[in-house]
Image (cartoon, rainbow, N blue to C red):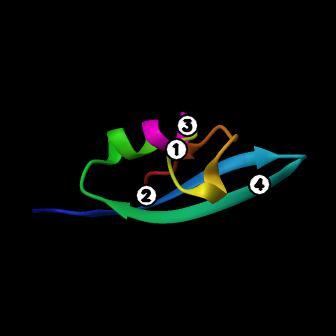
Amino acid sequence: MSFFVYMILSKHKDKFISYVGYTNNIRNRISLHNSSKGAKFTKGKKWEVNLF
């Protein structure tokens, strides 16, 4: 099974904040973060994936 390490960014009060995590289903995980069902740190913010 493959896993992804990801970094997501959000702009909050004119600053960018980042969060790093890992998952085997990147689309589902980002959806969870954006619906406030992801990690506690990510709740209440709009997140975007940065692809490198």
Q: Which mark, by number, is residue 16?
A: 4
The quarter of the picture where residue 28 lies is top left
**Badge nearest the viewer, 3 or 4:** 3
Residue linked to disc 3: 34
Tell me which segment is drawn in magenta. Answer: 31-35
Residue linked to disc 2: 52
Q: Secondary structure at mark 4?
A: strand
Residue 45 placement (x, y as % from top left):
69, 41
Q: Quadrant of the C terminus?
A: bottom left
Q: Quick one: 29 or 15, which is closer to the camera?
A: 29
Q: Are marks 1 and 3 in contact (CB under 8 Å)?
A: yes
- Along the polypeptide, which appears first: circle 2 or circle 3? 3
Q: Residue at x 23, y 63 (%)?
A: 3
Q: Which mark, by number, is residue 33?
A: 1
Q: Quadrant of the N terminus?
A: bottom left
Q: Residue at x 72, y 58 (%)?
A: 17
Depicted 42 relative to depicted 31: above or below: below
> Image check: 40 left or right of 25?
right
Q: Residue at x 90, y 46 (%)?
A: 13
Real-space Cα separation, disc 1 to disc 3, in angstroms: 4 Å
- Along the polypeptide, which appears first: circle 3 or circle 4? 4
Give yes or no for residue 14 being in the magenta stretch.
Answer: no
